[in-house]
Image (cartoon, grey):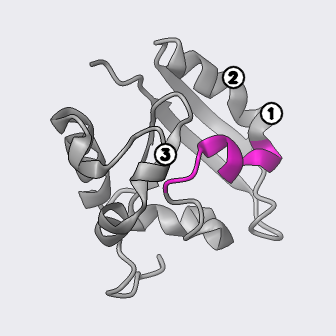
């Protein structure tokens, strides 16, 4: 069963309350409508989802994704993906490099290390699509 967020710690509240001005994204009020709309789509989904924004890949995820993150939540929200997953970045680097260069990727049944979830292995099937402005 997935972990239920407290009423004071939901993804939409994290999105609204995060200090985006300290990031390359700038204040949320300045975000283009399409980027804000995509972030809101991710946050509103019941399927575990995230979006990684800009070149530094700022990590925005929904409440369903929390169980995947384990103890990396809540510090992962708004942080660069490379920092969130620094211990397994060698497994993710090529995927994000492709997406940043404009190449969509589908990853079939891949084993991902989960050192933050002691004794657990994660098998993942995922699709990553570049943002097209």
Return the residue nearer the eye: 4 or 108: 4
Q: For mark 1, what is the residue? A: 90
Return the residue nearer the eye: 69 or 14: 14
Q: Position of residue 26 (x, y in %)?
A: 37, 43
Mark 1 and mark 3: Cα distance apart in space: 24 Å
Q: Secondary structure at mark 3?
A: loop
Q: Secondary structure at mark 1?
A: helix
Left or right: residue 74 compared with residue 49: right
- Which mark identifies residue 94? 2
Image: 6 above or below 130? below
Whichever of callouts 1 and 3 sits on the residue coming sooner in the sequence is 3
* Residues tagged 3 and 2 counted as in contact (Cβ below 8 A): no
Whichever of callouts 3 and 2 sits on the residue coming sooner in the sequence is 3
Q: Position of residue 74 (x, y in %)?
A: 55, 70
**Label 3 crowding class (10 Å Cα cut-off): few <14, some 14-19, many 20+?**
some
Residue 91 lies in what quarter of the image?
top right
Q: Position of residue 127 (x, y in %)?
A: 46, 32
Mark 3 and mark 2: Cα distance apart in space: 24 Å
Tell me the residue at 82%/49% (across/down): 87
Residue 49 seen anywhere in this rendered image of the structure: no
Tell me the residue at 49%/45% (across/down): 23
Residue 19 seen anywhere in this rendered image of the structure: yes
Query: What stretch of residues is rendered in magenta?
Result: 78-88
- Which mark identifies residue 125? none
**Label 2 crowding class (10 Å Cα cut-off): few <14, some 14-19, many 20+?**
few
- Which mark identifies residue 23? 3
Residue 31 lies in what quarter of the image?
top left
Say whether residue 83 is magenta.
yes
Q: Position of residue 104 (x, y in %)?
A: 46, 18
Image: 100 above or below 127? above
Tell me the residue at 81%/60% (across/down): 115
Tell me the residue at 50%/60% (across/down): 77
């Amino acid at each position: 069963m997935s972990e239920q967020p407290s009423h004071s710690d939901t993804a939409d509240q994290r999105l609204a309350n995060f200090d985006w001005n300290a990031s390359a994204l700038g204040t949320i009020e300045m975000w283009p409508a399409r980027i804000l709309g995509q972030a809101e789509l991710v946050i509103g989904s019941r399927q575990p989802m995230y979006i990684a924004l800009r070149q530094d890949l700022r990590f925005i995820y929904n409440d369903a994704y929390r169980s995947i993150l384990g103890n990396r939540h809540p510090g992962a929200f708004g942080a660069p993906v490379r920092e969130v997953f620094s211990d397994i970045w060698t497994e993710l680097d090529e995927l994000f490099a492709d997406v940043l260069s404009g190449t969509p990727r589908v990853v079939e049944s891949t084993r991902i290390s989960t050192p933050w979830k002691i004794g657990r292995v994660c098998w993942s099937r995922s699709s990553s699509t570049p943002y097209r402005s």
